[in-house]
Image (cartoon, helix red, strand yellow):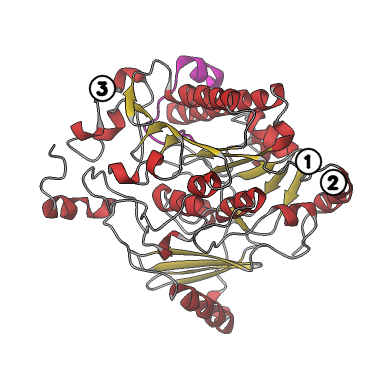
Amino acid sequence: MKTTILLHLLLLSTISFAQQRPTAEKPNVIIILTDDQGYADVGFNGSTEIPTPNIDRIANNGVVFTSGYVTYAVCGPSRAGLLTGRYQDKFGFSKNPLMAPKDSLMGLPLSEETIGAAMKKAGYSTVAFGKWHMGVHPSLRPNKRGFDEFYGFLSGGHKYFPKDFVLADIEQSKSQYDAYNTKLLRNTERVEESEYLTDALSREAVDFVERHQKEPFLMYLAYNAPHAPMEATEEYLNRFLHIKDLKRRTYAAMVSAVDDGVGELLDKLEELDIDENTLVFFLSDNGGPTSHNASDNSPLRGFKGDFFEGGVRVPFAVQWKGVIPAGATYDYPVSSLDIFSTAVALAKVTPKNELDGVNLIPYLTGEDKGVPHQELYWRNYNANKFAIRTLDSKQIMERETTYLFDIQKDIAEKVNLAYGQKDRVKAIEHLIKEWEMSLMDPVFMGLSEEKKYSELHPDRFDK
């Protein structure tokens, strides 16, 4: 497999330029993460129905990862992998955590160092915006996990209009989804918000950059859009009156709100003349749920929750002006795990734990002629399902079925080659078995076990 000709041509000029231009000693790092966004729902992956001119600026200024993956097909475990740079099954974060304010084990284990904590060791100011979903117990919240500042919510989702932010605190929750109605947190204090949630998160991100422009910073901007509930303002909905399906129109409006925010953030970096000193990643936390929120994963098979490509292959791009190529594509498989590894390498900081990602910059500049990953892995503990992506294959192992795809020729995973290539299947199964030995059982119950958890913890929501 080869990277595109375009990338090779751009690398020649970019490598020369990067060698002449000294890079910043500690570049800023921004991670923009959307929630449940479909693979096809960005302009740089071909969308014409939902224009994303500002998200596309990242692609135009940098590199699109055509084989960009996350570590799980739903949000909690996927985010745990991104925030730690480690396969989340290595520390038991195998499920979406429950809303359990009293449970200090219901979330990201304290044994794990977040990207925020690692970058703080290098003198970075760190901030998390938006969706946390790493635990609601006080010991698991962002300000205790390496982030100097936090503005957002702790649960796996949230309402978008401030009129619905009616609960004064998470302790007022009486059920799993009550937390969708909490007031937002600024660090440890509940605040009154007046703007549509996506706009509020964008506003806070721009303000943070303004305040921290003269020092290195790490920003984790975790939008909950376009995750349900499907809610958008008339301003955004009116941009898509040509879309007759109301759910798809609302979804498009929610993506457009994110795109506006991305534009405001990129504009601020340019205005302050720190855009060439800032690495900006954009990706979704998993594939779109399709019918649930009207997302579009084409041409991929499957959706959120699947280990088919539609569940784990996501829109993914990065820019670092003057250092990596502009307007290029990179075809070798990369992972959200690589964001942590890239950040700490640039910050020259040693992480607490062994990482599963790699520093992508040498691969993008052409300094490293190899490939970032020979294999990428996935496990669904409850379903006893595994998947592996090699350079040219994708194999999925379920309880009774094995799929093998020539992923380079069959991105839509239409032709199962497993029955005709049994030796190849066994060889790949061996790789999965070896990887499985590094994993552990889940350390907490997940959403599918909520009833059982509540029976075991009848005081779950008691004050």
Left or right: 63, with 407 as reference point: right
Left/right of residue 362 with respect to residue 97 in the rendered view: right
Q: CA distance from mark 1 to mark 3?
A: 45 Å
- Quick check: marks 3 and 2 in contact, CB under 8 Å? no
Note whether residue 136 is visible: no
- The answer to whether mark 1 and mark 2 are in CB contact below 8 A is yes
Q: Residues within 10 Å of mark 3 (few under 14, many from 20)?
A: some
User: Can you tell which of label 1 and label 2 is closer to the viewer?
Assistant: 2
Q: Measuring 19% from the left and 38% from the top, which residue is drawn there?
A: 175
Residue 417 placement (x, y as % from top left): 57, 73
Q: Which residue is mark 2?
A: 14
Examine the rendered structure and indicate whether residue 69 appears above or below residue 387.
above
Residue at 52% across, 53% down: 70
The answer to whether residue 141 is magenta is no
Residue 166 numbered mark, or none: 3
Stretch in magenta = 222-241
Q: Residue at x 52, y 25 (%)?
A: 202
Q: Pointer 1: what residue?
A: 326
Q: Earlier in the sequence, mark 3 or mark 2?
A: 2
Q: Is residue 379 visible?
A: yes
Q: Position of residue 106 (x, y in %)?
A: 28, 51
- Is-magenta flag for residue 231? yes
Residue 309 spot, x, y in % from top left: 54, 56
Count numbered badges in the picture.
Answer: 3
Which residue shows up at 39% across the image and 62% down it? 91
Would residue 34 be found to the left or right of residue 51 on screen? Answer: left
Classify mark 2: residues with Cα within 10 Å, few (<14), some (14-19) or many (20+). Answer: many
What amino acid is at disc 3?
Val
Marks 1 and 3 in Cβ contact (< 8 Å): no
- Looking at this view, is 414 or 79 the one in front? 79
